[in-house]
Image: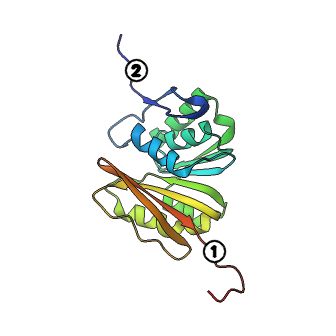
Amino acid sequence: MARKPGLRVTGGTARGRVLALVPGPGTRPTSAMLREAIFASLAGVDGLSVLDLCSGSGLLAIEALSRGAERATCVDSAGPAIRTIHANLRAVGFAGQAEVLRRRADLFLKKTDAGFDLILADPPYADAALAESIVSLATAALAPDGRLVLDHPSRTDPPAAPPGLELDRTRAHGDSAFTIYRRIDTPAGSDG
């Protein structure tokens, strides 16, 4: 019997559940190995508010919800991705914990001040300018001590951290890598 194509959730309450892929060749799903490495590096997401940018199938948001995140917002600019995210959230029972928005990631970041605890961003590898834009705009969307995880090609350096963010670590896994940035704030009245 042929297996239904899809992606398996790697951890938490939905572990092993198969999610639908976005139809067509335009979306590159995050590999299971990379997802496991990301969440191991985060050392827990219990109770966090998560933003999944360039969400594709919604897989990273669903991984976070499965592992205990409280809420997730999925943002993608493609109609097929939005339909797939809705279907996947319903399939694993997380639709009530998530908001799905059809927008460009950089435009969403320019207009939000939501204070997310964790931003997961997986922009198309061919769009380095979008990755740079996400990193440069993320500070205002992060809560104090919030983190941004950027998925990028392992052969390229991650974007430099702008004021308000510090680059915490980068880990390569095959052709892919992820970089974790942490929001840093200078206390009011400090001399720096």
Quadrant that contains the C terminus? bottom right
Q: What residue type is labelled 2?
A: Lys
Q: How crowded is mark 2: few (under 14 residues within 10 Å), some or many (20 or more)?
A: few
Label pair 1/2, CB-CB below 8 angstroms: no
Q: Is residue 69 above or below residue 135?
A: above
Q: Is residue 177 above or below residue 18?
A: below
Q: Residue furthest top?
A: 1
Q: Is residue 20 above or below residue 28?
A: above
Say whether disc 1 or disc 2 marks the residue closer to the N-terminus. Answer: 2
* Quarter residue 125 falls in: bottom left
Q: Position of residue 39 (x, y in %)?
A: 52, 46
Is residue 123 left or right of 82 when viewed as pictured?
left
Identify the residue shown where x is 64% and y is 29%: 93
Q: How crowded is mark 1: few (under 14 residues within 10 Å), some or many (20 or more)?
A: few
Specify whether residue 24 is in view.
Answer: yes
Residue on which disc 2 sits: 4
Q: Where is residue 77 in the image (x, y as percent from the top left)?
A: 47, 50
Identify the residue shown where x is 32% and y is 39%: 25
Quadrant that contains the N terminus? top left
Marks 1 and 2, how far apart in space?
Answer: 47 Å
Residue on which disc 1 sits: 185
Q: Which amino acid does label 1 sit on?
A: Asp
Q: Where is residue 117 in the image (x, y as percent from the top left)?
A: 63, 56
